[in-house]
Image: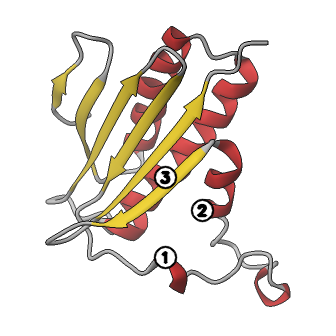
Amino acid sequence: MGEILSGETGNVDVFLDSTLDSVDDAENLVLKAAEEVGFGDDDLHKIGMAVRETVVNAVVHGNRYNSRKRVHLQVLKGDDRITITVADEGNGFEPRSVPDPLAEENLLQQSGRGILLIRAFVDDYQMQRMAPAGTEVKLVKYLRHE
């Protein structure tokens, strides 16, 4: 795993290597924080899937497995939510250029559904290009009190 910047408050601020092993590391860190907030099993599964998809995108599409580039993971715990930010150091892209994964011509494609899945699993999804390079994705999941 990469360099951990802080963790004393239970929040996470870490730089991960651009490898697929980092996907598991990120998921484990986020799920630990989400459990501490009080999320149940169903929401933990959704959060885990969203984090996995986001970090895979950062490693594979953003940093393109470049060992000199890192993935920045931040997790902020609130009383009623968890906020997860994942940033890569890649070239960035225009989100509107991503083909619609539900279009008939894309239904059998092996990739291209990550953003659709992420949006389905979290309550708020934001993506922005960063300067001078990179893409930052922010995920928010609210704790529902039943």
Q: Classify 10 Å Cα crowding around label 3: few (below 14), some (14-19), many (20 and above).
A: many
**Percent x, y of residue 66:** 23, 65
Q: CA distance from mark 2 to mark 1?
A: 9 Å
Q: CA distance from mark 1 to mark 3?
A: 14 Å
Q: CA distance from mark 2 to mark 3?
A: 8 Å
The image quarter in which residue 145 lies? top right
Residues at circles 2 and 3 in contact by the CB criterion of under 8 Å: no
Query: Nearer the observer, disc 1 or disc 3?
Result: 1
Residue occupying the far right of the picture: 104
Q: Classify 10 Å Cα crowding around label 1: few (below 14), some (14-19), many (20 and above).
A: few
Circle 1 sits on which residue?
95
Q: Classify 10 Å Cα crowding around label 2: few (below 14), some (14-19), many (20 and above).
A: some
Q: Quadrant of the N terminus?
A: top left
Circle 3 sits on which residue?
54
**Percent x, y of residue 19:** 34, 51
Q: Residue at x 61, y 61 (%)?
A: 114
Question: Taking 114 as reference, is 10 left or right?
Answer: left
Circle 2 sits on which residue?
115
Q: Mark 3 or mark 1, which is nearer the start of the sequence? A: 3
- Check the image and report above or below for 134 versus 93: above
Front residue of 75/52: it is 75
Question: Taking 15 as reference, is 142 left or right?
Answer: right
Q: Please give the label number shown on residue 29.
A: none
Color scheme of the displayed model: secondary structure
Q: Quadrant of the C terminus?
A: top right
Front residue of 130/12: it is 130
Three-letter amino acid code of the residue under disc 2: Ile
**Percent x, y of residue 63:** 29, 65
Residues at circles 2 and 1 in contact by the CB criterion of under 8 Å: yes
**Percent x, y of residue 144:** 70, 20
Which element type, helix, strand or loop, lies under badge 2?
A: helix
Q: Residue at x 80, y 76 (%)?
A: 102
